[in-house]
Amino acid sequence: MFRSNLLSVAISATCFTLLPFFVFAENALDSESSHSQPNESGMEVIEVYAQKRKQKINDVTVAVSVIDRQAIERQQLKDTTQLSALVPNLKITNNAGEGTPPAFNIRGVGMIDYNTSTISPIAVYSDDIVSGSANNLSMNLFDVEHVEVLRGPQGTLFGRNTTGGAILLRSKQPEKEFSGYINAGIAQYDTFSLEGAVNIPVSESTAMRFSMSHQDYDFSTNNQMPGQPDGGLKQTNLRVIVKSEFDDLTITSKLHAEDWSGKPKPIASLGIRRVDGGGDCTASQAGSSLCADNFGNQIGGNDFWDVNADTADRKHDTDSWGASVKFEWQLNDNMLLTSITGYRSLERFHSWDSDGPGNLIEGSMGTDNTLFSQELSLAVDFGDNHWVSGLFYVDEDIKQNNDFDLLRDFRAVPALAGNAAQFFYDNKLDNESMAIYSQIDHKLNDIFTLTAGIRYTDETTDYHANADLDTVNGYIPNFWDVKGSVKDDNFSGKLALNQKLNEYSSLYYSFSRGYKSGGYNAGYSTSPVQVAESEYQAEKLNAYEVGAYLQFWQQNARLHLTAFYYDYQDQQVFVNQTQGVAVDHVLKNAGDSTIYGLESELVLVPNHNWELRLNVGYLPEANMGEFNQNGVVVTDNRLPFTSKWNVSGAIIHEMAVMGRDLTAELSFDYQSDFYFDQEENSYIEQTDFVVINGHINYELNPAVMLTLWAKNLTNTEYSELRFNSIAALGAVTELKAAARQVGIEASYKF
């Protein structure tokens, strides 16, 4: 009944958001004088950088969601992996636990690979610098101006070709007045947070901004195993931005550093064998007292967040830093030359446990990652045209020092000892990409603007896969040693039309050609044959999209609508395939796929005191093409991490209490059923769920604010990850999502 009602709510929400469009469309082409100008309670004009220059949102031809600083603070978003609750058809999860490469998915396009060599079809750009591989997708959100989520292929303007989309982070920029803030908070699970920034004018032309964030917290898992930790992390992040503005030249320099350390989140090994010998438990019974794994192990607790895992010897450590410099030369009134140079270094070690209380499936991820990028572009305004062309180069080196320890407990049993093995991986990958691009916006008349863009990319991935093998019979160095290269070059581009309805509203029609090159999957291989077959080829995506940016109701309502259709060719798909007891992670090209759906974002501001938000994402079709390899055949299965419905929203109310401002927000995020892999196995399914969050802040005086917040108010039980370990363990490996958490925060502005 509950699930049925939730679906009805989602359908009703979609109908509700579509209704104003039809009402508005009848009068959309009336003269501009027939539209009311914004009254004093009207909305601010949204400006975005979705086309690499500052524009009103209704002037762009791409589906973009804007998350401002206030929304990030109200939702207590710590990093980019938590953005999905605010954007339709965006799903993000910490795929193998916090600190490992996360899985980003937009409109069914994503990558769920667990290893550190993957380049996601969704890129994150922090102050114009591309993230590179999936190692760098998780970035803390502190002292930011806003975040833009671009949905759909970004095959023309942005540095890294992405078939899924792009996420743009814009840090708070230096200003010419001394100012700053400091926030301090505490919460359940031994959580302490500290964030601050100071803005310092250096001279008439130069200002700098120093910002920092520190988080110290435990996970909400409750480890039942004696002497074993619940897990938790300490994260310290620093950033300095210096900006100098001269007559015709602006120079922006940035330096950042991150230091993370702690214990990984312990997994729950959900046994599925009935303890009474009556066969297998159902998916809903897995992990309960009715069930055990193949070795008789149980969790031993009745609470959802109880786990039983030997993680005392597991750890996480990240040290990273980066620098960038951006030069903007205003050559004349109509020409701007821009150079952006970036460098990033990341060293990370993360050890993991997949078997609960035993020593059967364990390992580590060691990564030494460096990235250099350079972009040079020229933007020209002439008449009714805006033209931008540029060159882009990125070189990323990934060195892996991983291990995979399989069935270690068997070494003490002579009859089983021959099955135990530990692999030590020493893999090296070098990804080099060069591109040239050009895009023009041509104003045809007062109503229509045509956008046309093209990009040529040449990309090469050189790899060297090497592994040693340790068994009870001896140590085998260079068990395999394979070198190779994957080279691709291709064209991508865009053709779009923007139709202006009035000053505040527009329609757009777009065709985009997305392209993502091939590469090498340097994962946890267990045989030389698998290593030799780990190359994958390029994927291509033809995206057809119609959208609307509408403002109405005396400019107190804003509605963004999108309908899209994807023709996906040679889709790169991550597949789990079982070979005996081991599960191989295979990244290969499936056949052609079809994805289509709808998105809606509605904001209502009836008056100064109320704001209502409702986002709806609908994916009726998101199935992968045919995959057939080593006995694993998948045809037309639902793509992983693709809920048919996702609905989120918020109610925000401002009032005066004892002469001071109080703001309260109640928000929710609903996700319908989805699978964590391609098998459509009920044990690896996340059923639908709703997470409700709350936030209240009170202004004690103009400088001091007190905030009370709560996440997951109803203590909803759901998973970050479920992995099929049934063949090896008779269990499902699960990472629990966060339980209810309540916290308090104080902030001071100066």
Image (spheres, grey):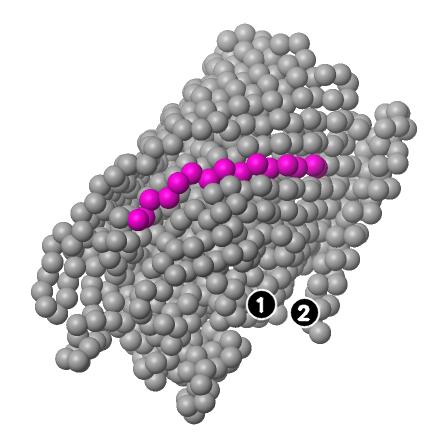
In the drawing, what numbered circle is on residue 687?
1
User: Is residue 542 a member of the stretch shown in magenta?
Assistant: yes
Query: Could you tell me residue 19's position as x and y percent?
Result: 82, 47
Name which of mark 2 and mark 1 comes first in the sequence: 2
Instruction: Inspect the image, locate mark 2, and give the three-letter code of the amino acid beneath it.
Output: Arg
Q: Main secondary structure of the magenta part?
A: strand
Q: Disc 2, disc 1: CB below 8 Å?
A: yes
User: Is residue 531 a member of the stretch shown in magenta?
Assistant: no
Q: Is residue 270 left or right of residue 687?
A: left
The single residue placed furthest to the top in the displayed view is 332
Q: Residue at the spot x=75%, y=27% of the render? A: 499
In three-dimensional space, the C-alpha distance between marks 2 and 1, rounded to whole angstroms, equals 9 Å
In the drawing, what numbered circle is on residue 3?
2
Q: Is residue 332 above or below residue 223?
A: above
- The residue range painted magenta reads 533-547
Give the image quarter of residue 495: top right
Q: Residue at the spot x=49%, y=24% of the render? A: 455
The single residue placed furthest to the bottom in the displayed view is 276
Q: Is residue 58 above or below residue 587?
A: above
Q: Residue at the spot x=14%, y=80% of the render? A: 414
Query: Could you tell me residue 663's position as x and y percent?
Result: 68, 53
* Towards the viewer: 535 or 284: 535
* Towards the viewer: 554 or 284: 284
Q: Residues within 10 Å of mark 2 (few under 14, many from 20)?
A: few
Instruction: Inspect the image, locate mark 1, and give the three-letter code of the amino acid beneath it.
Output: Thr
In the drawing, what numbered circle is on residue 147?
none
Query: Could you tell me residue 164's position as x and y percent?
Result: 52, 42
